[in-house]
Image (cartoon, grey):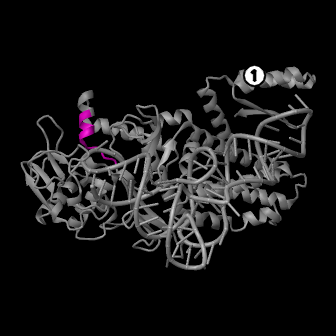
Amino acid sequence: MSKQLRKLTIFDSQEQTKRPFEPQEPGKVKMYVCGVTVYDLTHIGHARVFVFFDVVQRFLRHLGYDVNFVRNHTDVDDKILKRAAEQGVDPLELASQFIEELDKDMGALGCQRPTAEPKVSDHIDDIIAMNEKLLAKGFAYEVDGDVYYRVRKFDDYGKLSHRKLEDMEAGRSGRVEETEKKEHPFDFALWKRSKEDEIGWDSPWGKGRPGWHIECSVMSTHYLGDTLDIHGGGRDLIFPHHENEIAQSEAATGTSPFARYWMHVGMVNVAEKNDDGEAIVRKMSKSLGNFWTTRDVLQGYHPEAIRYFMHTTLYRNPITYAMDNLEEATRRVTYLYTALQRADETLAQIGHDAADNPPAGKKLVGGVKELVEGFMDRFDEAMADDFNTPKGLALIGELAKTINETTQSSDDATSVVAWGLYRMRQLLVEAGGVLGILERDPGEALAELRDLRLKAMDLDEAAIDEKVAARDQARADKDWERADALRDELADLGVEIMDSPEGTTWRFK
RNA sequence: GGCGGCGUAGCCAAGUGGUAAGGCAAGGGCCUGCAAAGCCUUGAUUCACCGGUUCGAAUCCGGUCGCCGCCUCCA
């Protein structure tokens, strides 16, 4: 007996509309997401996909679903071979090194691990088996050690990307592989014969390696069965990658659909200038060379600020990577943690440790009552509407604002106020947890945020503290001129001074 | 040429038939030695443009303009 779980709607990019989400087995979700080809560090576009599906996983679990999440590493690929040859290293070594780097970066971003993270090189036998199945069924043909998928044999070819073979202009992108071996220009390689000095595995067609798309068909069905509930990836994978996965999987298993819901994450764009000096936005990509690695971005911005930034836009829409946006996100995360810290301080003042010493009373009044009651229900409802993170953030912001309001007017630190604060704090952390933010101790997070700025601006904390102390002295002497001059100096460094009855604190603007 | 998406206040961004969330910036206020932070408050008669359907449209339909993505490297 499974309990009644909240209904959610998911925008399915095959149907191109939002649909109620109904997994095959009630309460259980089988999700497969395409990872990356590991020949270099990840960039922030990859990170967006990882962070988004991390939120999908977190939210589904939060609702009570049993989530089986598989995300692959493509560790056998032409690009890896090329890079390895350039560096004179073993391709699988190179790939495994970049898997490690990827784990570091995505871990730093707070992404929880999928249930399984299989690699192509561990599934060569399964890939060969699927090739044989496709050959036996006539969906594939072998030419000279290569195996190709016979696109015209699969009637539904194009159903995901909504295009017909005859409508597509082969070569429009300038990348169609010219080969007389193929029966049709859109036939694609399932298995590629290895050249003499290349890595390869023995197969019925000689030494070779898998083509690009087959690995996902093989690994997804291997771990999750013939029909996935959710299949995800970047929007740019719709064609040909996902289209080809459908063709391979449905032909091989004889089961349709291969995936019940297709979810595609929008591209990360970069603001640039074109040759005429006009401002334009373009997709971030390796080949255009206009990418920021996840690692670089993590050098300058807090992981939760990066996540917050990503959550400000719906996952399906493109998002522009820009310093202004990251800085705004940083300010918001700082604001949220500051509110959390204020709640803790106020609770401590009136004798309650927020974590394990909840206040008594459990009464709520006024705006706090209105906000707290049913809050998670509203938050879940927002998120259940195709993972509307901007709406989720707006709700989270209300909690922080009300905490600030309450702490500011908490002269009457009654148990009613205390319980409200306690609840708001709790909800902030709970809702934040779904988005993978507000997972740190407030003091720790604020210190991290400060350290990042100190490092970015090459500033010394002690020097700032010294100036602040000097200004405090000047204020004590009522030497307002000197105090203001010191504050101006600090302001030039981007440091804001905040005086309060408890003393002076500072932070970066 | 084909397929798809987008165009909402100075900026970012939700909202897909019932009369425009949220954030940043800006103005005013409370607080403050002055500030900052925080809080309160003001701001789109209007959703690229034109036409249509409807009691009612940012939301649906048709057309125009502009931008972006994909058409076998792509997350």
Q: Position of residue A214 (x, y in %)?
A: 24, 54
Q: Going 53% across and 73% down the picture, which residue do you hit? A: A5
Residue A31 % position (x, y): 40, 61
Residue A263 visible in image: no
* Picture quadrant where residue A69 is located: bottom left
Neighbourhood count class around disc 1 (C-alpha, 10 Å): few under 14, some 14–19, many 20 upward = some
Q: Residue at x 38, y 40 (%)?
A: A285
A45 is higher (above) or lower (below) than A394: above
* Callout 1: SS: helix
Q: Is residue A199 left or right of residue A162?
A: left
Figure check: A321 above or below A17: above
Name the side, left or right, on which B32 lies relative to A183. Answer: right
Is residue A307 visible in the rendered structure shown here?
A: yes
> Residues in magenta?
A73-82
Image coords of residue A167 (percent x, y): 23, 59
- Where is mark 1, residue-wise? A489
In the picture, measured across the screen, residue A488 lies left or right of residue A125, that is: right
Residue A299, x across and y down, in percent: 53, 32
> Which residue is painted at 66% across and 33% down in the image?
A450
Q: Residue at x 66, y 40 (%)?
A: A444
**In which quadrant will I find the C terminus of chain A?**
top right
Nearer the observer, A405 or A160: A160
Amino acid beneath label 1: Glu
Snapshot quadrant of residue A102: top left
In this rendering, the answer to whether B33 lies above or below A363 is: above
* Residue closest to the eye, A123 or A376: A376
Parent chain of label 1: A
A492 within the magenta span: no
Place residue B55 in its image quadrant.
bottom right
Q: How many marks?
A: 1
The extreme left residue here reads A144
